[in-house]
Amino acid sequence: MFTGISHVLDFSMTSNLLFENIKNIYRKISSAAIRSGRNPFDVTLIAVTKTVPIERIKEAVSLGLRIFGENRVQEAQRKIEYFSVQCADCKVEWHMIGHLQKNKVKLAVQLFDLIHSIDSIGLAEEVNKCASKENKMQRVLIEVKLSEEETKQGVAKEDLMGLIRAVSSMKNLRLEGLMTMPPFFDDPGLARPYFRELRELRDKAERSGYALPELSMGMTNDFEVGILEGATMVRIGTGIFGERR
Ligand SMILES: *Cc1c(COP(=O)(O)O)cnc(C)c1O
């Protein structure tokens, strides 16, 4: 699928813009990683493709992107099935980054490589049950709610250790780390305390013996401060594909 630079030069104006956006994001990821004394390759870019049509995702794949995030199971299903048939060799990886409803779990387990949004023991049990039926080791992150906003999902920090303990004991779940979504601020510096808090919660859990290497934190507006606070995964939509309609 990746046919190199000559293919890239054939692209339309919009694809050139996509190419510029991707380069720009990688440049900022590298610079933030280096500023925080880390290896840029330790930060994984997840391109968020909610509302983005398949044609556009194909362009992103041809420009080298391989990891995509979706927040609705139904919308993702269409895209994931398309790529698994039409582009089985591209090794595209799909992440569920949105809130997961219990009645969508079976499908989510069939579709997603990593689920970022485990936020209750009940949901974890359901994912574990479906993963067991599918004979799959499901990679998961726990989403933590650090903001007071009603619209934000996630486990309360008081309940985090209990959830980590429970998820870690489930045979078909592989807990890899934590995710959070701070409130939106025009000034990304204001999101920084939320990212720091997630890292500190992770560090505390690690001192209790749990390995949680991944921190999924940072979106278009605030991913650089996310990286400065230790993000290993950033979830970027608008910065790559432009404003969503
Ligand atoms: C939409 C979304 C993103 C990407 O947001 P942008 O601001 O477009 O980068 C990241 N994470 C989650 C959970 C999302 O729903």
Image (cartoon, grey):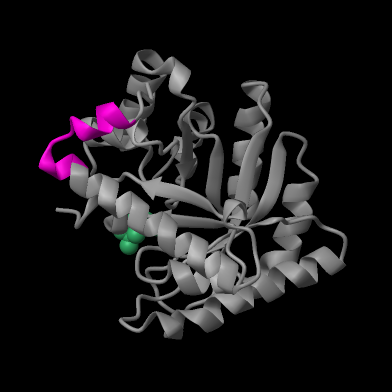
For residue 112, side relative to residue 124 (left or right): left
Q: Nearer the viewer, residue 130 or 77?
A: 77
Res 215 visible: yes
**For residue 242, which quarter of the picture?**
bottom left
Residue at the image point whose x is 35% and y is 84% from the top: 187
Dominant SS in magenta: helix
Q: Eyeballing the image, is 106 above or below 23? A: above
Ligand 1 is found in which quarter of the picture? bottom left
Residue at the image point whose x is 34% and y is 15% from the top: 86
Q: Which residues are magenta?
A: 5-15
Residue 57 pos. (x, y %): 29, 35
Residue 194 pos. (x, y %): 54, 78
Residue 93 pos. (x, y %): 49, 33
Q: Eyeballing the image, is 171 above or below 24? A: above
For residue 11, side relative to residue 223 (left or right): left
Residue 132 pos. (x, y %): 68, 27
Q: Quadrant of the N terminus?
A: top left
Residue 195 is a magenta residue: no
Q: How many marks?
A: 0
Residue at the image point whose x is 20% and y is 49% from the top: 17
Res 155 visible: no
Residue 14 is a magenta residue: yes
Residue at the image point whose x is 47% and y is 50% from the top: 45
